Image (tube, helix red, strand yellow):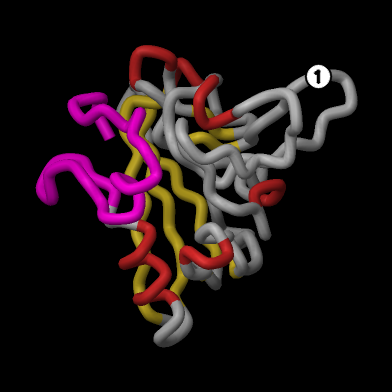
Protein backbone atom coordinates (compact mmCIF):
# COMPACT_ATOMS: atom_id res chain seq x y z
CA UNK A 1 0.00 0.00 0.00
CA UNK A 2 1.45 3.31 -1.04
CA UNK A 3 -1.49 5.70 -0.83
CA UNK A 4 -2.36 5.77 -4.53
CA UNK A 5 -5.84 4.31 -3.98
CA UNK A 6 -8.46 5.98 -1.80
CA UNK A 7 -9.71 3.49 0.81
CA UNK A 8 -12.41 5.86 2.12
CA UNK A 9 -15.14 3.84 0.40
CA UNK A 10 -18.69 2.76 1.09
CA UNK A 11 -20.01 -0.69 1.99
CA UNK A 12 -20.68 -1.71 -1.61
CA UNK A 13 -17.15 -0.82 -2.74
CA UNK A 14 -15.66 -2.94 0.05
CA UNK A 15 -18.13 -5.70 -0.79
CA UNK A 16 -17.13 -5.80 -4.47
CA UNK A 17 -13.48 -4.77 -4.19
CA UNK A 18 -11.58 -1.87 -5.74
CA UNK A 19 -8.15 -0.62 -6.73
CA UNK A 20 -5.47 -1.92 -9.08
CA UNK A 21 -4.42 -5.57 -8.92
CA UNK A 22 -0.73 -4.95 -9.54
CA UNK A 23 -0.50 -1.93 -7.27
CA UNK A 24 -2.87 -1.64 -4.33
CA UNK A 25 -6.38 -2.98 -3.94
CA UNK A 26 -9.02 -4.47 -1.67
CA UNK A 27 -10.03 -7.89 -3.00
CA UNK A 28 -13.64 -7.48 -1.86
CA UNK A 29 -15.39 -8.78 1.22
CA UNK A 30 -17.72 -10.96 -0.83
CA UNK A 31 -14.72 -12.68 -2.42
CA UNK A 32 -12.90 -12.93 0.93
CA UNK A 33 -15.95 -14.57 2.50
CA UNK A 34 -16.35 -17.00 -0.38
CA UNK A 35 -12.68 -17.97 -0.61
CA UNK A 36 -11.98 -18.28 3.11
CA UNK A 37 -15.01 -20.48 3.70
CA UNK A 38 -13.98 -23.08 1.11
CA UNK A 39 -10.98 -24.28 3.12
CA UNK A 40 -8.57 -23.00 5.76
CA UNK A 41 -6.38 -20.03 4.84
CA UNK A 42 -3.55 -18.36 6.70
CA UNK A 43 -2.93 -14.61 6.76
CA UNK A 44 0.45 -12.98 6.36
CA UNK A 45 0.95 -9.24 6.60
CA UNK A 46 4.26 -7.94 5.26
CA UNK A 47 5.61 -4.55 6.26
CA UNK A 48 8.63 -2.57 5.08
CA UNK A 49 9.99 0.22 7.26
CA UNK A 50 11.28 3.52 5.92
CA UNK A 51 14.81 2.13 6.28
CA UNK A 52 13.75 -0.86 4.10
CA UNK A 53 13.73 -3.32 6.99
CA UNK A 54 11.21 -6.14 6.41
CA UNK A 55 8.76 -7.25 9.10
CA UNK A 56 5.83 -9.63 9.06
CA UNK A 57 2.89 -10.85 11.10
CA UNK A 58 1.46 -14.30 10.45
CA UNK A 59 -1.74 -16.04 11.58
CA UNK A 60 -2.47 -19.72 11.01
CA UNK A 61 -6.13 -19.05 10.15
CA UNK A 62 -8.06 -16.26 8.45
CA UNK A 63 -11.80 -16.44 7.79
CA UNK A 64 -14.45 -13.82 7.03
CA UNK A 65 -18.20 -14.49 7.32
CA UNK A 66 -20.78 -13.51 4.71
CA UNK A 67 -22.66 -10.24 4.32
CA UNK A 68 -25.56 -11.51 6.46
CA UNK A 69 -23.25 -11.34 9.48
CA UNK A 70 -21.55 -8.13 8.29
CA UNK A 71 -18.37 -9.83 7.02
CA UNK A 72 -17.35 -10.59 10.57
CA UNK A 73 -13.72 -11.61 11.16
CA UNK A 74 -14.84 -15.00 12.47
CA UNK A 75 -11.52 -16.76 12.11
CA UNK A 76 -8.19 -15.28 13.07
CA UNK A 77 -5.86 -18.00 14.21
CA UNK A 78 -2.87 -17.96 16.48
CA UNK A 79 -0.29 -15.24 16.06
CA UNK A 80 2.84 -17.01 14.82
CA UNK A 81 5.69 -16.70 17.31
CA UNK A 82 8.17 -16.23 14.45
CA UNK A 83 6.44 -12.96 13.46
CA UNK A 84 8.94 -10.11 13.44
CA UNK A 85 6.65 -7.10 13.73
CA UNK A 86 6.32 -7.39 17.50
CA UNK A 87 3.02 -7.74 19.31
CA UNK A 88 -0.20 -9.09 17.85
CA UNK A 89 -1.94 -6.02 16.48
CA UNK A 90 -4.98 -7.91 15.15
CA UNK A 91 -6.06 -9.58 18.40
CA UNK A 92 -8.77 -7.06 19.40
CA UNK A 93 -10.28 -7.30 15.90
CA UNK A 94 -11.14 -11.00 16.29
CA UNK A 95 -14.85 -11.60 15.87
CA UNK A 96 -15.61 -8.00 14.88
CA UNK A 97 -18.01 -7.10 12.05
CA UNK A 98 -16.77 -4.95 9.19
CA UNK A 99 -17.59 -1.22 9.21
CA UNK A 100 -17.39 1.42 6.50
CA UNK A 101 -18.17 5.13 6.34
CA UNK A 102 -21.83 4.31 5.60
CA UNK A 103 -22.23 1.20 7.82
CA UNK A 104 -21.43 1.63 11.50
CA UNK A 105 -20.90 -1.83 13.05
CA UNK A 106 -18.11 -1.00 15.49
CA UNK A 107 -20.00 -1.39 18.77
CA UNK A 108 -19.94 2.28 19.78
CA UNK A 109 -23.35 3.92 20.00
CA UNK A 110 -22.03 7.49 19.90
CA UNK A 111 -18.96 7.21 17.65
CA UNK A 112 -18.47 5.94 14.11
CA UNK A 113 -14.98 4.51 13.57
CA UNK A 114 -15.33 3.91 9.80
CA UNK A 115 -16.36 7.48 9.17
CA UNK A 116 -13.89 8.99 11.63
CA UNK A 117 -10.91 7.03 10.27
CA UNK A 118 -11.95 7.30 6.60
CA UNK A 119 -11.84 3.62 5.70
CA UNK A 120 -13.38 0.20 6.15
CA UNK A 121 -12.08 -2.27 8.74
CA UNK A 122 -13.00 -4.71 11.49
CA UNK A 123 -13.20 -1.92 14.07
CA UNK A 124 -13.89 -2.60 17.73
CA UNK A 125 -15.27 -0.39 20.46
CA UNK A 126 -13.69 -1.27 23.77
CA UNK A 127 -12.07 1.60 25.59
CA UNK A 128 -13.86 2.91 28.67
CA UNK A 129 -11.56 5.97 28.68
CA UNK A 130 -12.50 7.12 25.19
CA UNK A 131 -12.73 5.89 21.62
CA UNK A 132 -10.30 3.16 20.67
CA UNK A 133 -11.29 1.70 17.33
CA UNK A 134 -8.22 -0.30 16.38
CA UNK A 135 -4.84 -1.80 17.17
CA UNK A 136 -4.20 -2.60 13.52
CA UNK A 137 -5.48 -0.28 10.82
CA UNK A 138 -3.68 -1.19 7.63
CA UNK A 139 -5.69 0.77 5.07
CA UNK A 140 -5.80 4.08 6.96
CA UNK A 141 -5.33 7.07 4.61
CA UNK A 142 -1.64 7.17 3.77
CA UNK A 143 -1.32 10.82 4.78
CA UNK A 144 -2.29 9.77 8.34
CA UNK A 145 -0.13 6.61 8.30
CA UNK A 146 -1.33 3.05 8.69
CA UNK A 147 -1.23 1.67 12.20
CA UNK A 148 0.13 -1.49 13.84
CA UNK A 149 0.27 -1.79 17.62
CA UNK A 150 3.90 -1.25 18.73
CA UNK A 151 5.35 -1.24 15.22
CA UNK A 152 9.18 -1.07 15.43
CA UNK A 153 10.12 2.61 15.21
CA UNK A 154 6.49 3.74 15.48
CA UNK A 155 3.74 4.02 12.89
CA UNK A 156 5.49 6.86 11.04
CA UNK A 157 8.13 4.26 10.18
CA UNK A 158 5.77 2.17 7.97
CA UNK A 159 6.60 2.53 4.28
CA UNK A 160 4.74 -0.43 2.76
CA UNK A 161 2.10 -3.00 3.75
CA UNK A 162 0.81 -6.08 1.99
CA UNK A 163 -1.87 -8.44 3.31
CA UNK A 164 -2.10 -11.86 1.70
CA UNK A 165 -3.83 -15.16 2.27
CA UNK A 166 -3.00 -18.66 1.10
CA UNK A 167 -4.48 -22.12 1.64
CA UNK A 168 -3.10 -24.04 4.60
Secondary structure that dominates the magenta span: loop
Residue visible at 48% across and 69% down in the picture: 66
Mark 1 crowd level (few <14, some 14–19, many ≥20, 10 Å Cα)? few
Q: In the image, is residue 21 above or below residue 168?
A: above
140 relative to 125 in the view: left or right: left
Residue 5, image x, y percentages? 21, 30
Q: In the image, is residue 114 above or below residue 85?
A: above
137 relative to 10 in the view: left or right: right
Residue visible at 74% across and 24% down in the picture: 110
Residue visible at 33% across and 34% down in the picture: 9
Residue visible at 45% across and 80% down in the picture: 37
Q: Give the secondary structure at mark 1.
A: loop
158 relative to 115 in the view: left or right: left
* Residue pointed to by mark 1: 130
Residue 125, image x, y percentages? 74, 36
Residue 49, image x, y percentages? 38, 28
Q: Quadrant of the C terminus?
A: bottom left
Q: Nearer the viewer, residue 61 or 150?
A: 61
Q: Quadrant of the N terminus?
A: top left
Which of the 4 image quarters holds residue 16?
bottom left
Q: Nearer the viewer, residue 97 or 158?
A: 97
Residue 102, image x, y percentages? 46, 35
Instruction: Based on the picture, tell me whether residue 156 belongs to the magenta stretch.
Output: no
Span of residues in magenta = 1-26
* Residue occupying the far bottom of the picture: 39
Q: In the image, is residue 36 above or below residue 1?
A: below
Which of the 4 image quarters holds residue 149?
top right
Amino acid sequence: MDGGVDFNRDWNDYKQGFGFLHREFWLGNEKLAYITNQKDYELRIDFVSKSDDPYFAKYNLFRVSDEGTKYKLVGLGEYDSSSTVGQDGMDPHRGQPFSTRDRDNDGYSSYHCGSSYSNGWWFFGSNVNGYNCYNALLNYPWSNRPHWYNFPGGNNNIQYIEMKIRPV
